[in-house]
Image (cartoon, grey):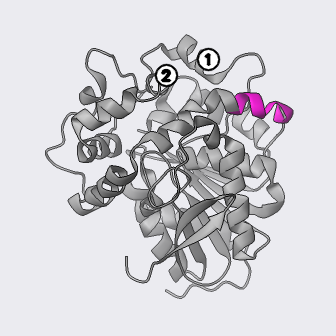
Amino acid sequence: MEGISHRMVFVNGINMHIAEKGKGPVVLFLHGFPELWYSWRHQILGLASHGYRAIAPDLRGYGDTDAPSSIDSYSVFHIVGDLIALIDTLGIDQVFLVGHDWGAVIAWNLCLFRPDRIKALVNLSVTYRPRNPTRKPIESFRALLGDDYYICRFQEPGVAEAEFASLGTATMIKKFLTFRQPGALIVPKETGFAGIAPSLHTLPSWLSEEDVNYYADKFEQKGFTGGLNYYRALDLNWELTAPWTGVQVKVPVKFIVGDQDLTYTTPGVKDYIHGGGFKRDVPFLEEIVIMEGVGHFINQEKADEVTAHIYEFIQKLTPGVVSTL
């Protein structure tokens, strides 16, 4: 991770850790669960070499950033508020935004609430999900996918944390990052999270023991509760975002997903992406890239390809930026 610098900034009432490298227009990277700024290590180096200033925070609740204890402190308004404060702290008007997993969810909402601060968005894995005014998210998940759907299993405070602790932090990191089973992630209580991604003897080529140890060390220190609280605040977010029902996301967007990603193979998602719903809700959706044979953690599994896709999209909107490769 040569040349990546680290510092703490005070934003929206919390201390936030950011990693950064490069000079030029800012590209802001938002990680998912259970991840850290480190998930973007390859893209930070790549975009910095192309004449951009790449910045990746540990989001609220993760890594070296503060982790408030209350679930209510993880509303989408808190997290988007952190990021607007970060952009203000950087002293800039607009950023290019890149998100993955929960980072993608936050990115959609950041573009929904404050499109004036975003030049363009490249989102990975998770499509925009318009608010359903008639039913809360957890009720919808239970009705469609059952009580053993992993998001439902995450809802009760302390339960998932205890199960993760019993299996070991490094084991859980390996299980999540190497999970490739298509379809919705169902976790029966009989087998629990011990039953997902059971073959851990050999890591994939894109994930090293050193990588796993970096994640595990940070999650040993901070715990998983901060990240899990994003899931536990889903119904709260539904209540808070009522004024944005039916509002479109109106920034230029490129969307990238692997065809083996559980988010892509969850029932209904392919129809939404390819059947016109996605374009209806995100009218400036310019490109959809489906990467063959690729799982959920696409920015790490296909790091160079994803970096190239990001650069290809944003460089069209930044005349004068010349690659330093």
Expressed as whole percent of the image width and height from the top left, the position of residue 214 reads: 31, 61
Q: Is residue 10 visible?
A: yes
Residue 235, above or below 298: above
Q: Secondary structure at mark 2?
A: helix
Expressed as whole percent of the image width and height from the top left, the position of residue 249 reads: 78, 45
Amino acid type indicated by mark 2: Cys
**Are the residues at dot 1 and dot 2 in contact (C-beta closer than 8 Å)?**
no
What residue lies at 25% left-to-right and 19% top-to-bottom? 191
Which mark is first along the chain, 2 or 1?
1
Q: Left of 322 or right of it: where is 294? A: left
Q: Which residue is mark 2?
A: 152
Expressed as whole percent of the image width and height from the top left, the position of residue 209 reads: 21, 58
Say few, some or many: other residues with alpha carbon within 10 Å of mark 1 (under 14 / 14 to 19 / 20 or more): few
Q: Which range is magenta?
A: 237-245
Expressed as whole percent of the image width and height from the top left, the position of residue 163 reads: 30, 30
Residue 181, above or below 178: above
Q: Is residue 243 part of the magenta span, yes or no?
A: yes
Q: Is residue 120 visible?
A: no
Q: Secondary structure at mark 1?
A: helix
> Where's the N terminus, which quadrant?
bottom left
Q: Which residue is mark 1?
A: 140
Q: Looking at the image, which residue sits at the far left? A: 201
Main secondary structure type of the part rendered in magenta: helix
Q: Left of 20 or right of it: where is 132? A: right
Q: Left of 271 or right of it: where is 212? A: left
Query: How many tags in the picture?
Result: 2
Amino acid type indicated by mark 1: Ser
